Image: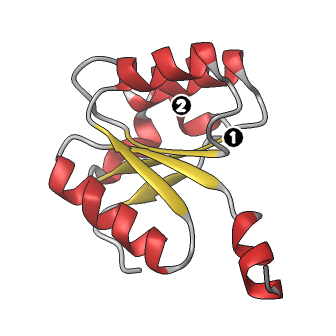
Amino acid sequence: MNMYEKKEQNKPKIAIIVNESEMGYLYAEMLKIRGFSATVYSESVSLLKLLESNANEYDVIISDVIMPDLNGYELSEKITALNNSIKVLLLTAYSDVKDQKCYNSNIPVLLKPFQS
């Protein structure tokens, strides 16, 4: 194993949960090009079930704020309860996110669209 491979192994493992799976796969590909391991989920509940059995599976969770089962804020609370070392990044296209419940929390919110 060379020095570059060792460095790549230390990069965070990322789970992506978004409303539009096509966008999730696009995000995952952008991250994979940069050497990250990224997996796309279409439902928050599926990811939570996995984390309940292995809370250390992911280092970073990227989620849309608006989701059909659990919104991004609810999901981040549940993830933190399972493993508070997992970092969460929320995505939204709504510029009024500052008025929403979790704006005052420490969860970063990235406004869409964005560039890689």
Q: Which residue is at a point 55% across and 28% down the rendered structure image?
A: 76
Q: Nearer the viewer, residue 95 or 14?
A: 14
Quadrant of the image containing the N terminus: bottom right
Q: Please, which residue is most extreme toward the front here? A: 1
Q: Are marks 1 and 2 in contact (CB under 8 Å)?
A: no
Q: Which mark is residue 55?
A: none
- Left or right of residue 10, residue 77 in this image: left
Query: Where's residue 91, x and y in %?
Result: 39, 50
Q: Which residue is at a point 54% across and 51% down the rendered structure image?
A: 14
Instruction: Examine the rendered structure and indicate whether residue 111 appears above or below residue 71.
Output: below
Q: Can you tell which quarter of the image residue 6 is in?
A: bottom right
Q: Which mark is residue 102?
A: 2
Quadrant of the image containing the C terminus: bottom left
Query: Where's residue 103, x and y in %?
Result: 54, 38
Q: Which mark is residue 106?
A: 1
Q: Nearer the viewer, residue 74 or 58?
A: 58
- Left or right of residue 80, residue 33 in this image: left
- Left or right of residue 2, residue 87 in this image: left
> At label 2, which amino acid type do we have?
Cys
Query: Where's residue 113, x and y in %?
Result: 28, 68
Q: Can you tell which quarter of the image residue 55 is in?
A: top right
Dot 1 crowding, Cα within 10 Å, few <14, some 14–19, many 20+: few
> At label 1, which amino acid type do we have?
Asn
Query: Where's residue 23, x and y in %?
Result: 22, 58
